Image: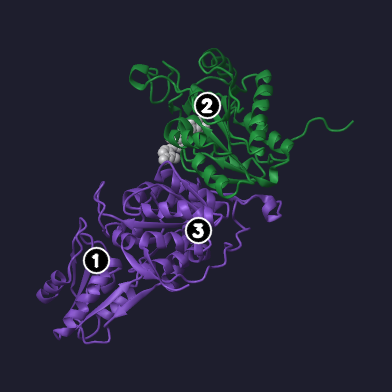
Chain colours: A green, B purple
Amino acid sequence: MGKTFKKPEALSDKHTHYCPGCTHGIIHRLVAEVIDELGVRGRTVGIAPVGCAVLAHNYFTFDFQESAHGRSPAMATGIKRVRPDLIVFTYQGDGDLASIGIGEIIHSANRGEKFTTIFVNNTVYGMTGGQMAPTTMPNQHTSTSPYGRDVKNTGMPLKMAELLSALETPAYIARETVLKPKYVVKAKKAIKKAFTYQVENKCFSFVEIVSTCPVNWGLTPLESLKWAEDNLLPYYKLGEYKIPE
Amino acid sequence: MGKVLMKGNEAIGEAAIRAGCLNYFAYPITPQSEIAEYLSRRMPEVGGMFLQGESEVAVSYMIFGATACGSRAFTTSSSPGISLMSEGISYMAAAQCPAVIVNIMRGGPGLGGILPAQADYFQATKGGGHGDYRLIVLAPASIQEAVEMVMTAFPLAEKYRNPVMILGDGMIGQMMEPVEFPDHLKTEPLNNDKWATSGMDTRKSDKNNIIKTLFLESKPLEDLNIFLKAKFDRIRREEVRYESYNTDSDYKTLIVSYGTMSRVCRTVVDNLKEEGIEVGMIRPRTLFPFPGKAIRQAAEKDTCKNVLSVEMSMGQMVEDVQLCVQGKRPVRWYGRCGGDIPTPEEIIDVIKSL
Ligand SMILES: Cc1ncc(C[n+]2csc(CCOP(=O)(O)OP(=O)(O)O)c2C)c(N)n1
């Protein structure tokens, strides 16, 4: 009998720096599987954000660039405009994409830049110690909203998939999660579609992944999965928001 | 090709194409928007690429991405726009990306004005962005020189793997002069297979390249800075460029002046010569590396009694002049800002009063 399960070639052997229970590892693996399946490893350039995934380049076996906080979509634009043959993706957290870098992601999506964005929404600034993000839920406790997020002062959590879907420019936009195996399968499908649209030079593609941050949420990994399912999924609804004609 | 009469901004755009740079990202700002207007027409004609970014912040990362993956790319802006790009410039210096950035300076601080100025000397030569880095800074005094500097900027940036800034002012951008374009350079950037994230297939390699600027441990970060310092020291040794004017004479006053300002000072030197007063001038063509040794030697001449830094700013380069003269002669500053350029008469009065 041949091998039925193996580590993707696009994934390296390095030990992870991510915290126990963090979902970045699953999402990295899904991206690596898709890169393998599409056979594009030799022409892929990943862009690491500023956030917990700044070290993502350690875990993949293709070219990688680190960006500045929020600027990955501009960097990806720069690469794709001068090297349309490369397969480029940004991998961004919610502080990175929905706060400091919201201008860059909106304009890249609106120009229809032909790269892919994997948007990991864990509702907090993980790397800097769990501060409030634009995606933090109402009343959610974080290190800078110790009394719970007061939406009267800070507004409602940003729904990036919906916001980007409102643009007229054709795009592929989906929100999935990796909280349970059944969701992982769907997330993989969305990521594969997103990269496939890029390979076909069709449109900008964006997959938001509802994620967890057990350490900064102050919950165990298992409690985090449950908290996210109960509290995040009703607000951050899963599914495909936009498909190019 | 013979001489053509051209506006500085347009000539700068054309020079980049002739330097083999077919990728241009920019955001409009006076007094340099004609570069983007010119290249938005011209790039499609030569198979090049122009993208108007959503902000100077974004543009700086577009050229970061483009140069990191091994392509030639450049941008142009003016003072407030360069402030916004400064974060990206710091990252490009850290990642050693050979980007070329043109600053057609206007008056500041704040929104300032749209008239010519040299108020960004500190920003260009001392940092601008955070961290220990230097840009190679070229300062043209004519449109012809701006063209030549743009064309040397790309190979220079690639040789040192360091961003290069062309520091002009609104006058260089806006005026028209006859200009002769040198032949096209070879269009390929230097071999960058060792570091560029150009895709492993492109390099026919199975080793991936990583462009990074985060070093969480002290040793690798210090090592990077030591490496960069050695590079900047080599640039200081090998890339100083300046022009001496009337320094064979027995001058009493030495003027130090660059860019548009130096053209007025040249008239000052000529007019005073007719009156029988000798004045020498050193015109830095590179602001980093600064021609400190040449200025010190010129200041130490027996006949020389004082040194005058003339600037379209409230006194920035004067600090470097003072540093290199090392107290051996008194160093004064004269300048105007807001867009009014000191006249020869004003400067002559200052020299006579020294
Ligand atoms: C310009 C700038 N501002 C602030 C920071 C500090 N900083 C580093 S990571 C981060 C937040 C990242 O949060 P997020 O994007 O949600 O990603 P996560 O760490 O949760 O994966 C911040 C604010 C920085 N590095 N640069």
Please determine if labels 3 and 2 lie on a single subunit: no
A148 versus B338 height, above or below = above
The chain containing the residue under callout 2 comes to A
On whether ligand 1 comes within 8 Å of the CB at mark 2, the answer is yes
Whole-percent x and y of residue B40? 46, 51
Residue plotted at (11% across, 73% down): B349
Q: Is disc 3 placed on a helix, strand or loop? A: loop
- State left or right for residue B297 relative to residue B56: left
Residue plotted at (69% across, 43% down): A41
Can the viewer see residue A23 in this picture?
Answer: yes
According to the picture, the residue beneath numbered tag 1 turns out to be B318
**On-image quarter of the C terminus of chain B:** bottom left
In the orientation shown, which residue stands out farthest toward the right?
Answer: A1
The chain containing the residue under callout 3 comes to B
Question: Of B114 and A154, which appears nearest the observer?
Answer: B114
Separation (CA) of disc 3 from disc 2: 34 Å
Crowd class of label 2 (few under 14; some 14 to 19; many from 20; radius 10 Å): many
Crowd class of label 3 (few under 14; some 14 to 19; many from 20; radius 10 Å): many
Image quadrant where residue B270 sits: bottom left
Q: Amino acid at mark 3?
A: Pro
Q: Earlier in the sequence, mark 3 or mark 1?
A: 3
Separation (CA) of disc 2 from disc 1: 51 Å
According to the picture, the residue beneath numbered tag 3 turns out to be B98
According to the picture, the residue beneath numbered tag 2 turns out to be A121
Q: Amino acid at mark 1?
A: Val
